[in-house]
Image (cartoon, rainbow, N blue to C red):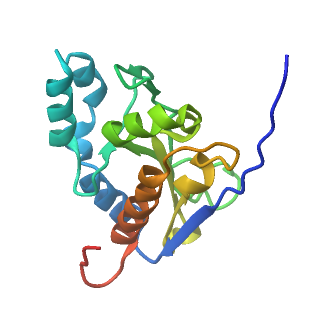
Amino acid sequence: MSQTITPLVAQLIKVHTSLPFEHVVSRLDKETNKEGSADIVPRIKASKDQAELVALIHNSLGESGFLYVSPPFSSWPEIGLLTPLHSYFSETSYNHLEKAEKQPKLLVYVIGNPLIAKSILRDNPFAALHVPLRLTIAELPERKGTIVAYYHPSSVMIRPDEKHDTSLIKLLDDKLEKLVSRITQTGGKARL
């Protein structure tokens, strides 16, 4: 047996906004076509061929170029992705003896683009540790805003000890940054 340890410097990005949690989640739902892509895994499994699969994915993508990935925890056929844990913790009071305030909401939101993922994983199978992508949406105490956090894809998917094409991973950096900017922006509506 042998073991290799590759040090990585993961970049955790946190974007603070004064927008309410529900507003940020609503924008994210729209950007990822949550309603239209929530049952994507069974529809992918039912695809009869590659052309149907590609068309299905293109038609399910949200405005951001990503789609919402929901349970069940199963693999995406022909792509080899596992849907990670999707958790939603809200409205839970842990201290019943004090104010009985609602605890801030926390949502782990799983998104991806299976066509981009397939290309990335072909060159770098270890990127599967971070595909599909995850965003954490956290409500600030006393409902004073929201934080959206995620790992910069290139900081966790590009391994310095291996040579592979990194252009798609860097594209994910840009797409994710623009998505988070749109869902957290206050004031006028801007498209990046």
Residue 102 seen from this side: no
Viewed as shown, does residue 153 lie left or right of 44? right
Measured from the top left, where is residue 162 in percent x and y? 64, 42
**Residue 15 sits above or below residue 166 on the image:** below
Seen from the viewer's position, the closer of residues 117 and 83 is 117
Q: Residue furthest front?
A: 163
Q: Quadrant of the C terminus?
A: bottom left
Q: Quadrant of the N terminus?
A: top right
The image quadrant that residue 181 belongs to is: bottom left
**Residue 64 sits above or below residue 76 on the image:** below
Counting labels gives 0
Identify the residue at image location x=65%, y=46%: 159
Measured from the top left, where is residue 161 in percent x and y? 70, 45
Viewed as shown, does residue 167 lie left or right of 150? left
Identify the residue at image location x=27%, y=56%: 31
Measured from the top left, where is residue 189 in percent x and y? 24, 78
Measured from the top left, where is residue 12 in percent x and y? 62, 61
The image quadrant that residue 28 belongs to is: bottom left
Residue 185 seen from this side: yes
Identify the residue at image location x=15%, y=26%: 51
Identify the residue at image location x=81%, y=38%: 5
